[in-house]
Amino acid sequence: MPSHLSADRPAAQPPGRGSVESLISQTRRLKGDVDAVRRDAEDDGSDHPRGRWQRALYDLALHQLNDLDEHLAQLRDGPLPTVAPEPAPPAPGSLLSRVGSAEWNLLTDEASWSGELYQILGRDPAAPPLTLDELPSLVLDEDRPKLTAMVTNCLVDARPIDGEFRIARRDGDVRTVHMMGEPVLDTDGSTASMWAVLRDVSELRRSQRAVSETRDSLTDRRQEAQTEHRIAVELQEAVLPQWRGSLRLPHRDPRTLDLAARHLPASTNTLIGGDWYDALELTDGETLLSVGDLTGHGVGVTSNMTMLLGAVRGMAMAGAPPGRLMAWLNQLLDATVQPALGSAVCCRYRPGTRTLVWAQAGHPAPLLFRDGTGRVLNAPDGVLLGATSGAVYGQAEETLEVGDLLLLHTDGLVPGHTGTAAANLLLDLAPRLAGTSTAQDCLWTVVQEFGESERADNACVLVAKVTA
């Protein structure tokens, strides 16, 4: 095949062998590093869209590095001999098996194909090569105009060829072929022949499609997560009392409880959970105070929380005492289509006798602060909501005094601490809380101490101060 370079310019000199060896070594080290990271990603086993996208990118990078390695090896070894006795066939899947060449002589209407091109196009090596007029017969119908335009531009306008098309092989396999070529000019400047290098880029395009598809999947998942987060926030804001400063119960006169509450979101601000707080004036003159938490995050959990809080309010309005209310909540969670676990504290405060009647379900007990000291109220029996059918919940009573401060909270209020450790840290605030005059001041002291730290989960805190 005549060189396409001879008509215009002298052939470029190959780079020094040592410099190419250095590039090959760098490429192979990079391949090893990328492959090691890819194996770590595979061992992770994550089916999250981000994990699939990352693995697809690693595969694409390795595919391109393999091709670069083989290109550099060809550059180092120099051009293949034009005559070789029975050359060994290229390894299946290697770069050499994916790159073929051809020349079409326009004067004699002869075609010359390399053995690799027969393999790429799925043709019988004993068959004559296809002419330029016959070549489109291998191409998918929708890609034929593209091939025709490339060939016409090359032959008529002497433009280089650089484009892709898909072929259907006799075995039914569809392959993507990248074609690059130039016209070879005769001495009078007319086009005498056309040479081309054709490369099977099917696997490369498959890897690129995988990257694109997983990236789109990741984008869709992010959009879904944003939508889910927005719905969860809207649900939460719709049901939790929006207290700005102390809450004055609408029909209470004179005021016997000064109330304040706060929801503290997780530091990432993306995990909306099932925490709630509530205060409700009941028809018998008593006040319902409650805090609770459902396990998990997202719209489903927030939706269950709104259902549970609605049930708490309804059963309290109907006169259910805290222990019975907890038992009914447990039955409700046990009967839901999507079972869930939750913890809660429910209190009924009787202002006439300053009596607090309360029950708990696997939840931190309220803290009582009086005269500069604090203690944890002795908790009655109670298991997590939804943990077992037919659970029985005990009740406890506590007589409060004017000036007492009651603090109810969910797990996670004290970042990095739960149970007794969290309670002790809150009790350490007793001297500072004694110097506050309102429930809002008390709440602000708690938030200043624990609300500005990095928080792994959501939390709620409710403060009630006895004023009369």
Image: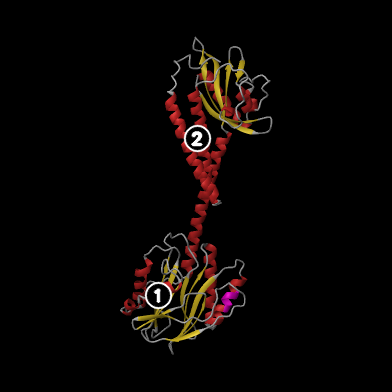
Distance from the alpha carbon under mark 1 to that under mark 2: 59 Å
The percent position of residue 36, horizontal first and vertical second, equals 50, 43
Quarter where residue 10 is shown: top left
- Please state which amino acid type lies under the numbered disc 1: Asn
Q: Is residue 310 above or below residue 212?
A: below
Q: Residue at x 52, y 55 (%)?
A: 224
- In the image: residue 214, left or right of residue 258: right
Task: State which region is magenta.
Answer: 327-331
- In the image: residue 231, left or right of residue 257: right
Q: Is residue 231 above or below residue 424?
A: above
Q: Residue at x 41, y 86 (%)?
A: 400
Which numbered dot is residue 424? 1
Q: Residues within 10 Å of mark 2 (few under 14, many from 20)?
A: some
The percent position of residue 370, horizontal first and vertical second, equals 36, 83
Quadrant of the frame with the N terminus: top right
Residue 229 colored magenta?
no
- Tell me which colouring the rendered structure shows: secondary structure
Per the image, label 2 sits on a secondary structure element best described as helix
Per the image, label 1 sits on a secondary structure element best described as helix
Q: Can I make out residue 317 in this image? A: no
Q: Give the mark nearest the N terminus, 1 or 2.
A: 2
Callout 1 touching callout 2 (CB < 8 Å) = no
Name the residue tied to disc 2.
Answer: 65
